[in-house]
Image (cartoon, rainbow, N blue to C red):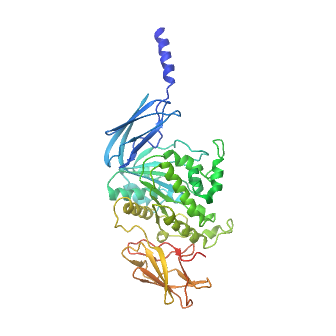
Amino acid sequence: MMTAILALLFAGQASLHAEVKLPNIIGSNMVVQREKPIRIWGWADPGERVTVTFGESSQTDTADQNGKWMVELKEQKASNKPQNMLIQGNNEIVLKNILVGEVWLCSGQSNMQWNMKQSRHGKEEIPKAKNPNIRLFQIGRKVAPVPQDNVPATWRACSPQTVSGFSAVGYHFGEKLHEELDVPIGLIQSAWGGTEIEPWTPLEGFAKIKELASFKDAVSKLTKESEVDSHTPSAIYNQMIHPLAPLSMRGIIWYQGESNCVLGDTTIYTDKTLAMVSGWRSVFKQGALPFYFVQIAPYVYTSRKEKYEYLTVESLPRFWDAQTACLDKVPNSGMVVVSDITADVNNIHPGNKRDVGDRLARWALAKNYGQKDLVHSGPIFQSMTIEGGNAVLSFEHCGSGLQSFDGKPLSPFMVAGTDKKFVPAQAAIEGNTVVVSSPDIANPVAVRFAWHETAIGNLGNKEGLPAAPFRTDNW
């Protein structure tokens, strides 16, 4: 009888202690970021001591009054050898099959969400995706009115079965990195089709940009009882990004903007991008994490004019302009142009996601992995001078030289005089410059290139990367 009573007492005492728990982003099969402190966190009883051991590194922390704890383990070099991680408190957790390599967050709207089964190269690429050294973490689409601590997802080794529903852009990006670096790659997909940038932006980001004060005020009023959806500012961030912080990672790739273009955003999108990126960087606490993004593809946005009457054929070029401006306004950023791989301007989802991922990987390889001589961008307009009635344009990222992709005269260029009326222009490559002229414009003052929603220019560099659309004026 006494034994039974003691057993009940001990059982009751044990029930007072909460088990040590981890967020799902910390789990078996994960990749931890090499050459950065390895951050591991979770929950336990307030005051409970939790010890984490991984390899030769071991650290202990005491759970605070809210039950939260975090340790930073010593950084490690890349390793293809699976390791276990031991977490010890009132209970023990053993995480298995962990690799050390490169971790990237892959985020945005539908063109990032577009999976391997849907992509043009899916049928040939999925059967070849047998690579256990690439690990995938795919976050489901869900919103929350306030920041959350966890996401319902698990790490899985890459296989034809696990990759088929994963982001095609994200996978091809990671595949290229793995091919070039020969280290484990961890890819985190957090994407949602049809979403604007505002729901992805945390309160900390809105607070940094005075032009976005109305969003900061709206988010500040949200409580855990508030009703939100996928268009509510910060609502996607709260559930699909915040639970990942402060995971150590190398950087972020981003493919979004179609929804903001439809809404008529132009110059303000630059500030919105800065708000989101600076907000994410502040919560991940790893300085200026690399941020490489895709300039959205040519598309007939005016087909939606019946609903969005303000749209014109220049709405998309003005949005492109705002995206290009991010290169100067968002530190440690890079932009991929995809106009040349757009097969159908009536399809907002270009099927070729392999080249998009490869081009994003070029930025990472050049800027983060030591391939400094790798040409990683197409030509970006830099400056204009007027010489003898001609406009002479200079560019960054000319690579080994400028070229016309199809061997035809450069197009579509337009030039204007002081009357601000643009007319079609002739353009020719001279060294690393483009000379633009028109017999109808004696004194040119402005040039535009590919300044139409369906324009697909043929200017690029000899490495096959297209020039970004641009204008020299600010009219």
In this image, 191 relative to 179: left or right?
A: right
Residue 58, position as x, y percentages in the image: 35, 37
Nearer to me, 6 or 194: 6
Residue 146 spot, x, y in % from top left: 60, 44
Residue depicted at x 60% and y 64%:
268
Visible residue check, residue 452: yes
Q: Position of residue 99 (x, y in %)?
A: 35, 46
The residue at the far top in this view is 1
Q: State the residue at coordinates (60%, 73%).
A: 314
Name which quarter of the figure residue 181 lies in.
bottom left
For the question of whether residue 113 can be seen, the reply is no
For this rendering, which residue is in front, 320 or 35? 35
| Quadrant of the snapshot with the C terminus | bottom right
- Answer with left or right where residue 99 lies relative to residue 269: left
- Asked if residue 217 is positioned above or below residue 296 in the image, the reply reads above
Q: Please provide percent x and percent y for residue 225.
A: 66, 41
User: Where is 36 relative to 312, above or below?
Assistant: above
